[in-house]
Image (cartoon, rainbow, N blue to C red):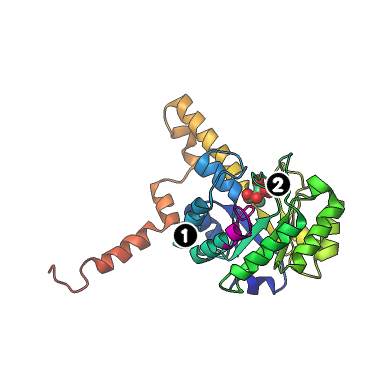
Amino acid sequence: MTLKARLSRDGVVVAPGVYDPLTALIATEAGFEAVYLSGAAVAYTRLGRSDIGLATMTEMAETIGLIRDRVDTPMIVDADNGHGNALNVQRTVRLYERAGASALQIEDQSLPKRCGHLAGKKLIPAGEMVGKIKAAVDARASEETLIVARTDAIAVEGFDAAIERAERYADAGADVLFVEAPRSEGELSAVAARFSSHLPLLANMVEGGATPLRSADDLGALGFRLVIFPGGIVRALARAAQDYYRSLHEHRTNKPFRDRMFDFDQLNAVIGTPELLALGARYEDPAGDAK
Ligand SMILES: C[C@](O)(C(=O)O)[C@H](CC(=O)O)C(=O)O
């Protein structure tokens, strides 16, 4: 089922952050209906850098393609600010859509952008963002590809201005609204109350970020339809990697850690090695010439 079709049904869609085919595969096997290709998670893992707009459009497009080669799960893609002006937005939409994005998230920050939960953000004028949303809508090849409009205005211009911006972005044709970083329960509920009967709303749960953490079900009850947990996988894996490396460095053996990791066969089962080798065997000598 496409993400658009899924969002037309009841219930909240939970999309965990992924950053490569392995995380997308494991998330899919865990049962998620959609995944979120997080720009932050890509910057953290591929660049070892902060989420400040350093990951390029082509690096993201390549990542989308690699994930699509492995899973069909609907994928919401973080397109930052579209990587430039309205024309850059159009190129980004075409490239990401062809690579396999089901939805593109575009925000109203100016370049250089930064994570929505970092201080010091700057915005483009609302009118310019309206043009970028229209450009995105015009550029998509399929109406199944959703445009998620994000405003970062709460921290910059205040809550009311953020709501006004979101209204203008909805009028410009956005399919989903993402009011970034509400600072309290009250702001979360006010966003939901304003928009939830109008069009699907996305909530962003960042561990340690500006927004109080709530379960997807609680957010669904408020009226949110999509909940992303974008950087959580990297925070979990980075912690595991630190523990693993420190243990190996200290003990000079992997023994103390072995019950906290997959063994060779277990990892091969996760990535489907037996199935892949069996498939390869079917093509080895289909005509029986080698006999
Ligand atoms: C959603 C987000 O744009 C992302 O890159 O995943 C980030 C999340 C994060 O930095 O953890 C954001 O700006 O909220």
Q: Which residue type carries mark 2?
A: Gly
Q: Is mark 2 within 8 Å of ligand 1?
A: yes
- What residue range appears in magenta? 78-90
Which residue is pictured at 79% across the width and 45% down the height?
156
Give 232 or 155, whichever is nearer the viewer. Answer: 155
Determine whether the residue tagged by mark 1 lies in a helix, strand or loop: helix
Q: Is residue 82 magenta?
A: yes
- Binning the other alpha carbons within 10 Å of mark 2 as few (below 14), some (14 to 19) or many (20 upward) gives many
N-terminal of the pair, mark 2 or mark 1, is 1
How far apart are the two marked residues, 2 and 1, measured between alpha carbons?
A: 26 Å
**Residue 228 in sight:** yes
Give 22 or 244, whichever is nearer the viewer. Answer: 22
Q: Is mark 1 within 8 Å of ligand 1?
A: no
Q: Relative to 247, is 225 above or below? A: below
Which residue is pictured at 59% across the width and 72% down the height?
2
Q: Which residue type carries mark 1?
A: Gly
Q: Is residue 110 magenta?
A: no
Residue 116 got which mark? 2
Give 47 or 140, whichever is nearer the viewer. Answer: 140
Determine whether the residue tagged by mark 2 lies in a helix, strand or loop: loop
**Residue 35 in sight:** no
x, y percent for residue 101: 55, 63
Which residue is pictured at 72% across the width and 51% down the height?
124
x, y percent for residue 53: 60, 45
The C terminus sits in image quarter: bottom left
Q: Name the residue under label 1.
A: 65
x, y percent for residue 248: 46, 30
